[in-house]
């Protein structure tokens, strides 16, 4: 397994581009199952998770062609209906093929995703919603078996905000008979982008980006073209890297309007963040100020930026309280940060971070996607050398982050496993 070796202390200076958004791309790949014809997706990031969703689609008889960051996806003759355990266990977002399969082919056999490092992450809202649309759901041997002659529109109210649940049911409802209303729907930019793509395919969706999404079912959807938006979490991660190294970087294609909560917290911590043309300049200050943060569904502070902000707070002046309200176990990075000298204690779903003068480099282990990014950030700011193992977690959601940081002046390299 490859390692990433970082020698801390270098300021990040220069310009950088973020890649296409992983969490926008994955549901849009799944949505291709609803269509006839060839979908053309561009600015698709080179990520392990994209490779996995492509394998899931090919396993369903979907034709997928790839040329660099452009994908041609033709589900005209999609025939299979199974998303097997060995694929779904490597990437739980594979469950997003469930709604499209039931809507388009009338049946699906999708492995239950199971839990992951950050939490149990059940899919009960997805299943309850599909049942309300008329699907017959059975759980057999770790698989979800879903059947429906034709889904019928319904009003579905989510107990709590779910990005995947909103996406799965919005996709299913596009081909249902009649009108579906999703109440307490997720408002994440990735949900809005999916709805826009579905409408380009011929769907009739209103209210995306609000708590109430309305979908008028249609008979069929046609393939479309789409350019994936830049990844807001990668952009936020790079801003935090600048903040940690007292750097000064320009992110050339930053999705600023999707990062308001993140930018507000980083400015509160002392960073200077200014829009410059269609990009954004992010500069770190001499000493980071401590800030409190509570993760929340969009437009609140994103849980996918919690670990990255926590690293900044380990070096802030004073005490910070970071509360994680979305996932029940998204503090795994804390024990690794403590090994680098961070002073953090956990109280319930909050981490109390006491800023220290320095972190020191150490061998650490990545445990999930955003935790691995946060350990790299810690290495950038630490004194000495940090070795991050199990970087396959990083490759799931960041394309060449080590190269991008090296181009900004970081002393970082990827060491191939022997
Ligand atoms: C999406 O996951 C993202 N993944 C996650 O990003 C992100 O952290 C999360 O949304 C929250 O913003 C993709 O888009 C591929 P949820 P998702 O359904 O859809 C509970 C990353 O690092 N819940 O909004 O799985 C669930 O357990 C990843 O890029 C149920 O209880 O998240 C969680 O506690 C990590 N029952 C909360 O809701 C359900 O049926 C939010 O989950 C569904 C969810």
Image (tube, rainbow, N blue to C red):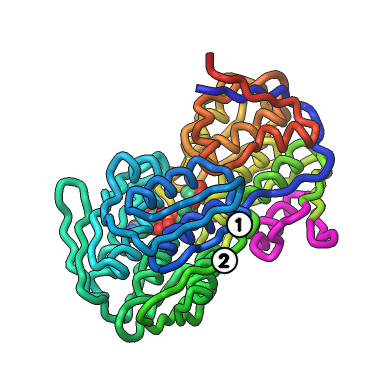
Helix, strand or loop at mark 2: strand
Q: Is residue 277 magenta?
A: yes
* Quarter location, residue 225: bottom right
Q: Which residue is mark 1?
A: 42
**Gap in angstroms between the C-alphas marked 1 and 2:** 8 Å
Say whether disc 1 or disc 2 marks the residue closer to the N-terminus.
1
Taking depth in this image into account, of 94 and 233 the one nearest to the observer is 94
Q: Which residues are magenta?
A: 252-279
Q: Is residue 364 magenta?
A: no
Label at residue 194: none
Whether residue 324 is visible to the viewer of this picture, yes or no, is no
Q: Is residue 295 left or right of residue 161?
A: right
Helix, strand or loop at mark 1: strand
Q: Which residue is mark 2?
A: 225
Report crowding for label 2: few under 14, some 14 to 19, many 20 or more residues within 10 A (C-alpha): some
Q: Marks 2 and 1: in contact by CB < 8 Å?
A: yes
Taking depth in this image into account, of 288 and 125 the one nearest to the observer is 125
Q: Is residue 353 left or right of residue 115?
A: right
- Residue 333: give x, y in percent of width and height: 51, 35
Examine the rendered structure and indicate whether residue 333 appears above or below residue 270: above
Examine the rendered structure and indicate whether residue 65 appears above or below residue 187: above
Examine the rendered structure and indicate whether residue 11 appears above or below residue 240: above
Taking depth in this image into account, of 268 and 15 the one nearest to the observer is 15
């Amino acid at each position: 397994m490859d390692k990433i070796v970082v020698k801390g202390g270098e300021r990040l200076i220069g310009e950088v581009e973020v890649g296409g958004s992983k969490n926008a791309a994955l549901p849009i790949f799944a949505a291709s199952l609803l269509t006839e014809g060839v979908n053309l997706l561009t600015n698709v990031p080179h990520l392990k998770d994209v490779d996995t969703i492509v394998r899931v689609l090919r396993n369903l008889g979907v034709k997928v062609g790839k040329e660099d960051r452009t994908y041609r996806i033709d589900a005209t003759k999609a025939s299979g209906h199974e998303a097997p355990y060995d694929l779904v266990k490597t990437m739980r977002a594979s469950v997003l093929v469930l709604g499209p399969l039931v809507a388009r082919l009338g049946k699906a056999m999708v492995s239950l995703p199971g839990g992951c490092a950050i939490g149990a992450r059940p899919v009960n809202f997805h299943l309850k919603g599909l049942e309300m649309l008329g699907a017959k759901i059975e759980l057999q041997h770790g698989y979800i078996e879903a059947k429906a002659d034709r889904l019928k529109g319904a009003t579905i109210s989510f107990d709590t905000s779910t990005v995947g649940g909103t996406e799965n049911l919005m996709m299913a409802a596009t081909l249902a008979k009649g009108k579906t209303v999703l109440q307490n729907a997720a408002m994440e930019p990735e949900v809005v982008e999916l709805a826009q793509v579905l409408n380009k395919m011929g769907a009739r969706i209103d209210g995306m980006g609000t708590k109430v999404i309305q979908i008028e079912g249609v008979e069929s959807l046609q393939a479309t073209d789409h350019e994936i938006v830049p990844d807001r979490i990668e952009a936020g991660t790079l801003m935090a890297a600048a903040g940690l190294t007292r750097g000064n970087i320009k992110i050339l294609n930053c999705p600023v309007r999707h990062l308001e909560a993140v930018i507000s917290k980083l400015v509160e911590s002392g960073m200077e963040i200014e829009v410059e043309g269609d990009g954004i300049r992010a500069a770190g200050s001499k000493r980071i100020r401590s800030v409190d943060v509570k993760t929340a569904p969009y437009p609140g502070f994103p849980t996918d930026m919690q670990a990255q902000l926590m690293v900044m707070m380990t070096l802030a002046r004073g005490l910070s309280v970071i509360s994680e309200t979305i996932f029940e176990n998204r503090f795994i990075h804390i024990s690794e940060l403590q090994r680098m000298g961070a002073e953090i204690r956990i109280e319930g779903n909050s981490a109390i971070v006491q800023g220290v003068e320095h972190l020191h480099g150490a061998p650490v282990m990545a445990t999930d996607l955003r935790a691995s990014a946060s350990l790299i950030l810690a290495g950038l700011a630490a004194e000495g050398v940090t070795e991050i193992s199990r970087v396959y977690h990083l490759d799931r959601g960041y394309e060449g982050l080590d190269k991008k940081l090296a181009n900004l002046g970081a002393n970082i390299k990827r060491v191939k496993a022997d």
